[in-house]
Amino acid sequence: MQDESHQLWGDICGYVWSKKGERTSIKMSNYRTSQTWYRAVNIYTGEFILDRAKKADTKYTIDFINWLIYRYKEARHVIIWDGASYHRSEGLRTYLEKLNGGLPESEWKVRLLRFAPNAPEQNPVEDIWLQGKNWVRKNFHRLSSFKEVTSMFETFLSGKVFKFNKIKQYLIPNI
């Protein structure tokens, strides 16, 4: 399972108390400080894989796939993800045609499947992302910079193994 997420400085601690019926405004000093993450979970081992990117687009998606291939050299990869435009782009299709080189589908190095449209609840990576974000929220009072926020998020999730039923339901035998 794969998904991207974006952390924005000012978005991490998104709750505030105010008087009932009154609108509360919070000034933000920097709207552009952000971090994009490509992340995946290996449904067979539960291993969570996290990689930083400048943004989510076709180039960084291909970079992430190449990183997965490099990391798991002997494996064939089935990536299940959402219908983001860069997951369906012409550039990605061209890349896959070259990568899979006219092989029969049963021998492809990378095969892509999509979750149902507008159904993030199907993707276990969304649940993992929420665990990381909640960890940062609980410890936000200790953090004074966005660098500390992203470091804490990455430290909390890196190397973790997740084995919950939502992941197991996607096991695909004999691919």
Image (tube, helix red, strand yellow):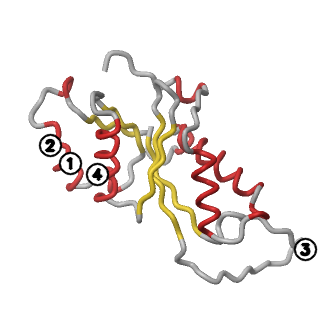
Residue at left offset 24%, top offset 51%:
92
Position above or below: 175 against 53:
above
Q: Which residue does the numbered mark 2 point to in the structure image? A: 97
- Nearer-N-terminus badge (4/1): 4
**Which secondary structure lies at badge 4?**
helix
Residue 19: give its label. 3
Q: Using residue 12 as the reference point, say whether residue 126 is left or right of it.
A: left
- Nearer-N-terminus badge (4/3): 3
Q: Which residue does the numbered mark 1 point to in the structure image? A: 93
Decide: few, some or many residues near mark 1? Use Cα within 10 Å; few <14, some 14-19, many ≥20. some
- Nearer-N-terminus badge (3/1): 3
Q: What's the amino acid at mark 2? A: Glu
Residue 32: give its label. none
Tell which of 142 and 45 is nearer to you: 142
Q: What's the amino acid at mark 3? A: Lys
Q: Using residue 21 as the reference point, say whether residue 30 is left or right of it.
A: left
Residue 62: give its label. 4
- Nearer-N-terminus badge (4/2): 4
3D distance between C-alphas at marks 4 and 3: 47 Å
> Disc 4, disc 2: CB below 8 Å?
no
**Which secondary structure lies at badge 2?**
helix
Asked which quadrant contains residue 116, the reply is: top left
